[in-house]
Image (cartoon, helix red, strand yellow):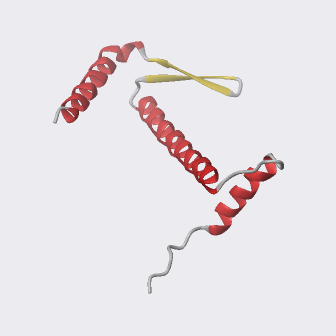
Amino acid sequence: MNDPPRIPREEITKSILSYFLKSPDLVESFDGIARWRLLEEQVHRSVTRTELALHWLIDEGFLLPDTTGSRTLYRLNPDKLMEAENLVRSRADLSEEGGSS
């Protein structure tokens, strides 16, 4: 007999309960809760991927960070302009080749 997969029940349970505590009058279907949870997870993954990409761009010198107060702003490194254009162009070429099946 197959047991259901083990899920970090406490984390999910607290997350769902927190969702309802933010709006105590909320009435939601299972599908609505599932969609909200999937969206939350997708946003978290997207933020993580963006952070990793941003760190790579800084490490490679394509972007220059400038911290003003508690906020960091980023700008293109003018010394890497041609290299950045080549990188974007080569990635666009790869995605076009992959999509032309």
Which quarter of the figure is the C terminus placed in? top left
Indicate the quadrant where residue 47 lies. Answer: top right
Q: Nearer the viewer, residue 58 or 33?
A: 33
Task: State the count of labels.
Answer: 0
Q: Is residue 38 above or below residue 92?
A: below
Q: Is residue 92 left or right of residue 59?
A: left
Q: Is residue 98 left or right of residue 69?
A: left
Q: Residue furthest bottom?
A: 1
Q: Is residue 39 above or below residue 97?
A: below
Q: Nearer the viewer, residue 7 or 48?
A: 7
- Percent position (x, y) of residue 15? 69, 56
Name the residue at 51% across, 43% down: 48
Name the residue at 79% across, 47% down: 22
Q: Is residue 70 left or right of residue 100?
A: right
Name the residue at 70% across, 28% down: 70
Q: Is residue 98 above or below residue 15?
A: above
Q: Residue furthest top?
A: 78
Q: Nearer the viewer, residue 86 or 24?
A: 24
- Percent position (x, y) of residue 8? 60, 67
- Percent position (x, y) of residue 13? 69, 63
Q: Residue furthest left?
A: 101
Name the residue at 42% across, 35% down: 56
Which quarter of the figure is the N terminus placed in? bottom left
- Percent position (x, y) of residue 74? 53, 22
